[in-house]
Image (cartoon, rainbow, N blue to C red):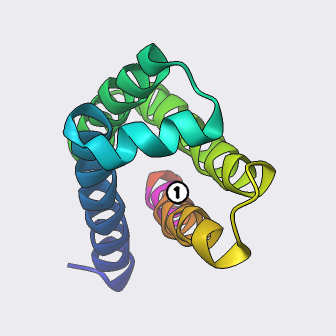
Amino acid sequence: MSTQKIIYWVATGLFSLWMTFNAYAYLFSAEARRICVHFGFPDYFRIELGIAKILGVIVLLFPIVNSRLKEWAYAGFTITMISGFIAHISSGDSIRSSLPAIVALQILLTSYVIYQRLQAPKN
């Protein structure tokens, strides 16, 4: 297996694991519910985010999924990570408590950049 494929699968796997735990928390954790209230999000939005994250992880992890759908998953996760950072900052949280969203975004972007390289036609 090439180095790029290893980097892709490590980044994608790490990000997917992170989002799966995050989705589980959004759906079942009282702490996540409290955080969403702190952000001013309605309760249904917390559930939507949890379900969307699970669906996005499935799209990213399964190689047979159409590349256009993967692009949408990457875009959706990018918007979600940026919005998470903004939600923390706008709610008065410290930069330190907002950093996980940026770290997750960096891992996602690593996955995306390598995904694009692997999809490029070979000359």
Q: Is residue 7 left or right of residue 91?
A: left
Q: Quadrant of residue 66?
A: top left
Element at label 1: helix
- Identify which residue, 45 or 38, lies in the foreground: 38
Observer able to see residue 18: yes
> Residue 37, position in %: x, y?
53, 34
Label count reads 1
Find residue 114 and report its horizontal and vertical position in percent: 49, 66
Q: Is residue 14 above or below residue 6?
A: above
Give the residue furthest to the top: 44
- The residue depicted at 34 percent of the width and 85 percent of the height is 3
The region drawn magenta spans 114-118
Residue depicted at 76% across the width and 58% down the height: 92
- Dominant SS in magenta: helix
The C terminus lies in which quarter of the figure?
A: bottom right
Q: Is residue 51 above or below residue 98?
A: above
Which amino acid, mark 1? Answer: Tyr
Where residue 71 appears, x then y in whole percent?
A: 53, 35
Quadrant placement of the N terminus: bottom left
The answer to if 33 sits in the magenta stretch is no
Write down the residue under mark 1: 112
Q: Is residue 63 visible?
A: no
Q: Position of residue 20 (x, y in %)?
A: 24, 48
* Residue at figure coordinates x 28%, y 42% from the top left: 30
- Seen at 73% across and 49% down, the residue is 91
Q: Residues within 10 Å of mark 1 (few under 14, many from 20)?
A: many
